[in-house]
């Protein structure tokens, strides 16, 4: 990346200190300027005696009315400023669904079932085997009970049973953790992309927990794996309008009705990667909750590339030649994801990066435009903006791609890789499993910033930035409780299946 | 009896996996004694009365937990380098069938035939591909009154009746949240040949070299439940200090010989005995695999049943350990010559001593709530010929025993009406063609 003429200079140790000095100076520029100005004024005031200061004051000829008006204006400006700021949104707590051990799907069982299904031909079986071997999944991922049958039962009743199981279990755990009563919930947002019964899943939650009749409920479907962050965004907007409220956001993906029973390769991937999972998140804008809230929502940035046809058709649910419905993942998926990510980080960059990085990026941009077009663009170092990264565990390729393009270390993507290994691709709830991993490892300290990146069909790339409000102590009660001591594990490139 | 329609419907097939993953790369080689049993299958049915914690989902959960202790049961068979079978412990799980019966348990026990009983233990023989074939099939059948029947079918190569029983017993212990009483003990080198092997097994050599049994007579089965008093009175009539097994085996042998038209005189009976606790270094009860010994007992049927009782008792008590080792070495040699399995149970009349089984201790409900099984049935598949007599424990404690016979149809009919047997007032169940 550095220009050829100065290799020795750039690799010297002294340059590291120059860089650090530069970053401190630029990031805290205002502070430096303010402090130097204040020091100058104080020195000046100290030089003048108290009588001279008084006479200076009197010479300004302020009348009482003018004084009162200016104070009044100042107070009004301050009030206006404080009232127009957005309400802080606190994440009080969240809970993830913990699958029972009877739902576990070892690779050998998955392959055995695939071989026994009459609708899969030999090539499809071998393809699924290859996918599993390279998927980055472990032997403890779970599928819903209906998928354990030969052939899988994908009735509406089975789908509702899975929805009840995952959603109610996550919400029960959240209520137990936060001590919240169901009657206190003012806003409910449920997102589940592929299963949308009537009445909706949000109605199912309201029915089960006997929520209030004036609840604001929303059910988002069809929005893909990034719908979790879209639900948080919706809840946040609602919490700006409604004061002193609690919002319950439930993210899940119901696997039961979506087993693909055909032989088209581009549609077989979801069978191999998608697993059962759900998360329930409690958001609030009550000032009182700040004391016990875990995180504060700093920013959400949503990018939608649906205007571009290639991105739109990238993840497409359709029927194959034999009439079996499935989700078709096109070959351009990685390229499209890369584009969407670039668009998203171009937007979020200026909002979160420290001034030093932004200045460098601006200079490199100006330099490329005016001076030397062939200069490589400066990729801002997002590691300076965030301590933790939660990348949607969509698949091993997605995590590898992001690690490369954002230049992240193995520890930064560890949460994503381990969540993929332990739980599989749980779609919109995967970000919460990853966050829980970081907490369970005891790495979450007060003041840490977390960047959640979700990708979804459409093609969408959504980011959320959270700031940790209190250090989270281990042991953490959650989906990783029984297994965190075994992680991180080394995940081989290819797992040889017997 | 069935009136046209089937009373048992199997409505779903799934796979039950263990709760904890198996360490990858584990294998379990089958012993030579296991290989000998290749032609046979085992079918067990445990009947349970309704109970508060007895429900399908709970049973499946405890099954998952117990399978974590049995990595060999959840593995798949494959051919090893020497051509013998080894189990690749690949964590694939056991096949689980869900079924429903539209009668109550009492009605079933009173009226079901032998053939119907086999519908409670689903079985699929090995197809072309052993790597996707589960050696265990477990069926959970729910009766109309919420009673349950747990059927377990497996290949005899993996387990003998003791092993299969203790699997169900471990499952019951796990369901009750109790500690597993007889934990499985996987020890492949248990029956490896001695340093100076002396292989010899005249009985099995004879069986293996004879032509395979081809008969067109159908086999029938019947179950006789003898109460404690009945067995005690039988012992009083014959030999007061004999074991219930010897007495019942002798009684049935003499009656079957007469029914089959064998002229009274010196005769031989094949006895099958579990040798786990008969070795100088005894194997734990939970030893996984086959630990059975086939031997020939001789007695003069014309000299009266009491004499036969004596002879059988002496034979079983005095079984030399040397013979067991010689048998294991013979089996080992045979396997290395690459010869196929042959019929072990039969074609001659065989008697199986299984009254040491702890089947009735497999209680899924806690103590005092009647969680013990109402009845346990055992059947061995592939035992064609003159028949098989199995002496099993019974629900009642003490000297009570259950005797299951599988005989040629005509002989079975005669035995079911035989006075000498019916004199002791046994309950006859599950009679009929298999």
Image (cartoon, coloured by chain):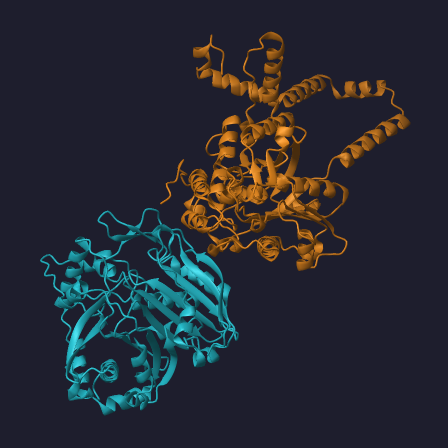
Rendered residue at 34%/76% (across/down): B221
Q: Is residue B100 above or below residue B64?
A: below
In the rendered structure, the colour chosen for chain A is orange
Query: For residue A347, which quarter of the picture?
Result: top right
Nearest the camera: A180 or B65? B65
Q: Is residue B322 visible?
A: yes
Q: Is residue B400 visible?
A: no
Q: Is residue B329 left or right of residue A263?
A: left
Q: Position of residue B49 (x, y in %)?
A: 46, 76
Q: Is residue A348 above or below residue B312?
A: above
In the rendered structure, the colour chosen for chain B is cyan
Which image quadrant: the C terminus of chain A? top left
Rendered residue at 37%/60% (across/down): B136
Rendered residue at 55%/11% (across/down): A374
Q: Is residue B333 above or below residue A328?
A: below
Q: Position of residue B318 (x, y in %)?
A: 14, 75
């Amino acid at each position: 990346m550095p220009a050829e003429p100065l290799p020795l200079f750039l690799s010297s140790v002294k340059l590291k200190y120059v860089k650090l000095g530069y970053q401190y100076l630029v990031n805290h520029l205002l502070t430096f300027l303010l402090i130097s100005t204040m020091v100058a004024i104080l020195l000046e005031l100290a030089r003048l005696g108290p009588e001279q200061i008084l006479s200076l004051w009197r010479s300004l000829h302020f009348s009482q009315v003018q004084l009162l008006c200016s104070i009044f204006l100042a107070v009004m400006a301050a009030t206006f400023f404080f009232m127009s700021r957005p309400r802080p949104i606190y994440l009080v707590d969240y809970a993830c669904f913990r699958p029972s051990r009877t739902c576990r799907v070892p690779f050998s069982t998955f392959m055995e079932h695939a071989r026994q299904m009459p609708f899969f031909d030999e090539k499809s079986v071998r393809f699924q085997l290859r996918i599993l071997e390279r998927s980055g999944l472990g032997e403890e991922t779970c599928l819903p009970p209906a998928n354990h049958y030969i052939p899988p039962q994908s009735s509406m009743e089975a789908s509702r049973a899975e929805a009840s199981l995952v959603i109610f279990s996550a919400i029960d755990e959240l209520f137990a953790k936060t001590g919240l009563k169901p009657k206190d919930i003012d806003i409910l947002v449920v997102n589940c992309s592929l299963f949308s019964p009537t009445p909706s899943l949000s109605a199912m939650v309201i029915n089960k927990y006997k929520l209030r009749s004036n609840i604001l409920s929303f059910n988002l479907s069809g929005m893909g794996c990034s719908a979790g962050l879209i639900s948080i965004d919706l809840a946040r907007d609602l919490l700006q309008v409604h004061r002193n409220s609690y919002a319950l956001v439930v993210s899940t993906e119901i696997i039961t009705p979506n087993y693909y029973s055909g032989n088209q390769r581009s549609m077989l991937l979801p069978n191999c990667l998608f697993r059962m999972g759900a998360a329930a998140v409690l958001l609030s804008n009550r000032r009182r909750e700040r004391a016990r809230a875990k995180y504060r929502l700093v920013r959400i940035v949503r990018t939608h590339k649906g205007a571009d046809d290639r991105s739109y058709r990238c993840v497409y649910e359709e029927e194959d030649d034999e009439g079996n419905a499935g989700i078709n993942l096109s070959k351009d998926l990685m390229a499209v994801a890369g584009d969407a990510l670039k668009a998203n980080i171009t937007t979020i960059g200026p909002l979160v990066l420290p001034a030093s990085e932004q200045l460098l990026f601006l200079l490199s941009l100006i330099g490329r435009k005016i001076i030397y077009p062939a200069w490589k663009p400066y990729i801002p170092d997002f590691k300076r903006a965030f301590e933790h990264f939660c990348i949607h565990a969509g698949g091993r390729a997605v995590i590898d791609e992001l690690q490369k393009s954002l230049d992240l270390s193995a520890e930064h993507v560890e949460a994503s890789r381990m969540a993929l290994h332990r739980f599989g691709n749980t779609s919109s709830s995967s970000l919460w499993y990853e966050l829980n991993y970081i907490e369970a490892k005891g790495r979450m300290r007060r003041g840490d910033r977390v960047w959640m990146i979700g990708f979804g069909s459409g093609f969408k790339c959504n980011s959320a930035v959270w700031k940790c409000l209190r250090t989270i102590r281990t042991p953490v009660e959650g989906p990783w409780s029984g297994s965190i001591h075994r992680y991180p594990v080394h995940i081989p490139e290819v797992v040889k299946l017997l | 009896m069935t009136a046209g329609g089937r009373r048992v419907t199997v409505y779903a097939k799934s796979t039950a996996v263990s709760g904890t993953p198996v360490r990858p790369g584990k294998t379990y080689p089958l012993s030579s004694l296991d290989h000998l049993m290749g032609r046979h299958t085992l079918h067990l049915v445990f009947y349970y009365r309704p109970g508060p914690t007895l429900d399908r989902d709970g049973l499946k959960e405890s099954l998952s937990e117990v399978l974590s202790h049995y990595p060999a049961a959840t593995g798949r068979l494959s051919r090893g380098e020497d051509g013998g079978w080894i189990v690749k412990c690949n964590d694939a799980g056991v096949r689980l069938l869900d079924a429903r019966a539209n009668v109550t348990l009492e009605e079933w026990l009173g009226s079901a035939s032998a053939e119907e009983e086999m519908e409670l233990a689903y079985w699929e023989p090995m197809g072309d591909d052993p790597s996707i074939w589960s050696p265990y099939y477990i069926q959970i059948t729910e009766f109309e009154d919420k009673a349950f029947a747990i059927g377990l079918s497996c290949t005899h190569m993996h387990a003998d009746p003791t092993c299969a029983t203790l699997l169900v017993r471990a499952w019951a212990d796990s369901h009750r949240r109790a500690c597993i009483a007889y934990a499985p003990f996987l020890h492949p080198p248990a029956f490896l040949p001695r340093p100076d092997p002396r292989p010899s097994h005249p009985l099995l050599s004879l069986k293996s070299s004879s032509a395979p049994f081809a008969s067109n007579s159908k086999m029938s089965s019947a179950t006789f439940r003898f109460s404690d008093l009945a067995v005690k009175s039988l012992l009083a009539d014959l030999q007061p200090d004999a074991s219930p097994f010897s007495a019942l085996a002798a009684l049935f042998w003499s009656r079957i010989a007469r029914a089959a038209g064998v002229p009274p005189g010196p005769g031989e009976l094949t006895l099958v005995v579990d040798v786990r606790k008969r070795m100088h270094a005894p194997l734990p009860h939970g030893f996984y695999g086959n630990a059975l010994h086939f031997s020939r007992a001789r007695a003069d049927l014309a000299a009266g049943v009491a004499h036969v009782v004596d002879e059988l008792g002496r034979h079983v008590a005095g079984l030399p350990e040397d013979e067991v080792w010689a048998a294991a070495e013979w089996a080992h040699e045979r396997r290395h010559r690459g010869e196929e399995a042959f019929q072990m149970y039969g074609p001659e009349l065989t008697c199986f001593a299984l009254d040491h089984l702890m089947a009735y201790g497999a209680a899924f409900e806690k103590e005092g709530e009647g969680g013990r099984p109402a009845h346990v049935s055992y059947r061995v598949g592939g035992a064609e010929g003159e028949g098989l007599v199995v002496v099993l424990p019974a629900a009642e404690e003490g000297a009570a025993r259950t005797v299951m016979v599988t005989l040629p149809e005509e002989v079975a009919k005669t035995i079911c009406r035989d006075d000498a047997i019916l004199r002791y007032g046994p309950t006859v169940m599950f009679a009929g063609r298999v």
